[in-house]
Amino acid sequence: MTVIAHLSDLHFGADDPAVVAGLVVELNDERPDLVAISGDLTQGARSHEFAAARRFIDSLRVPVLAVPGNHDITAYNPVERFMRPYAKWAAAISGETEPLWRDRTVAVLGINTAHRAGYRLDWSRGRFSRRRMELLLERLNAMPRDLVRIVVAHHPILASEEAPNMPLAGKARETLAALAAADVRLVLSGHAHRAYTRASGEGPLVVQCATTTSVRLRGDPNAYNRITVLAGVAPVIEVRVWTGSRWSERAQVQQTAKSL
């Protein structure tokens, strides 16, 4: 059995210190096997924000896997954005933007959906690029078949049933089909600051996370997902919400459509 704490959209620089402090206590008390952060660790990719994100990661007594979000690339310095977009990320967070973590139950692989520019005017939407998908699929093919395959990305790949027209990452439909063919069982993502879980037919279960620590709420409270994975059975997804003074269980989703 593996327990993953799925955080997203921390937005250090626009974070709530009380939420952050409570989260550190909760995670260090609960000790999940992995903390997976699906992007936007910073608000504006400034050095002091990356330093705050690093202090948060260092305060946790469990492994951490993180992928960048669109806010982790500067919008203020064009030279930095186009010439060295991940220099601060490498210095403060990790030399990898597409990390890998595995144990005896799961293989968790990150994919970077943030981009310096794009065809759309809204560059914040991100996309699953061909090059990055090819690399991800190669890595998935190299994984032992008995491991539950989980992908972590920043941008949404499947809309919620309540908001079917919400913006998705570029090439989302093609990517969802490719991940299904590669036997990926869970996709963890963020960006929309809304929490929902949705099955994609015979494909992976999509688990979206609200903003975990930011003051930039969009209807959902600060929250993270606690995901319990046991090979051969359906995952249990518990949404943990900040009540103003502590973390509490909001809902537990037993996904029965497809076992892992």
Image (cartoon, rainbow, N blue to C red):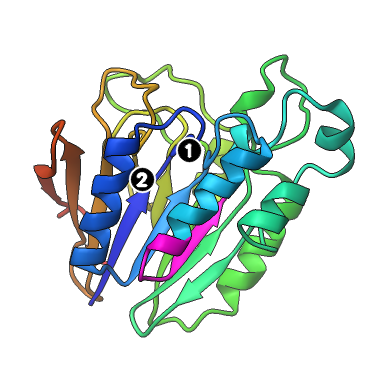
Range covered by the magenta-colored residues: 58-67
Inspect this view and state whether residue 68 appears.
Answer: no
Snapshot quadrant of residue 100: bottom right
Front position in the image: 218 or 150 = 218
Q: Residues within 10 Å of mark 2 (few under 14, many from 20)?
A: many
Q: Amino acid at mark 1?
A: Ile
Which part of the image, by quadrant, shows the C terminus? bottom left
Asked whether 66 falls inside the magenta stretch, the response is yes
The disc at residue 157 is 1
| Residue 237 picture location, percent across and down | 20, 52
Which part of the image, by quadrant, shows the N terminus? bottom left
| Residue 27 picture location, percent across and down | 26, 59
Q: What residue do we see at 72% from left, 14% from top?
A: 121
Inspect this view and state whether residue 23 appears.
Answer: yes
| Residue 197 picture location, percent across and down | 27, 41
Front position in the image: 208 or 141 = 208
Q: What residue do we see at 76% from left, 23% from top?
A: 76
Q: What residue do we see at 89% from left, 32% from top?
A: 79
In terms of sequence position, does the residue under pointer 1 or pointer 2 come before the other?
1
Front position in the image: 145 or 16 = 16
Question: Is disc 2 placed on a helix, strand or loop?
Answer: strand
Q: Which residue is mark 2?
A: 206
Asked whether 171 falls inside the magenta stretch, the response is no
Q: Amino acid at mark 2?
A: Val
Asked whether the beta carbons under mark 1 and mark 2 sit within 8 Å of each other, the answer is: yes
Reply above or below: 100 against 41.
below
| Residue 200 picture location, percent across and down | 35, 43
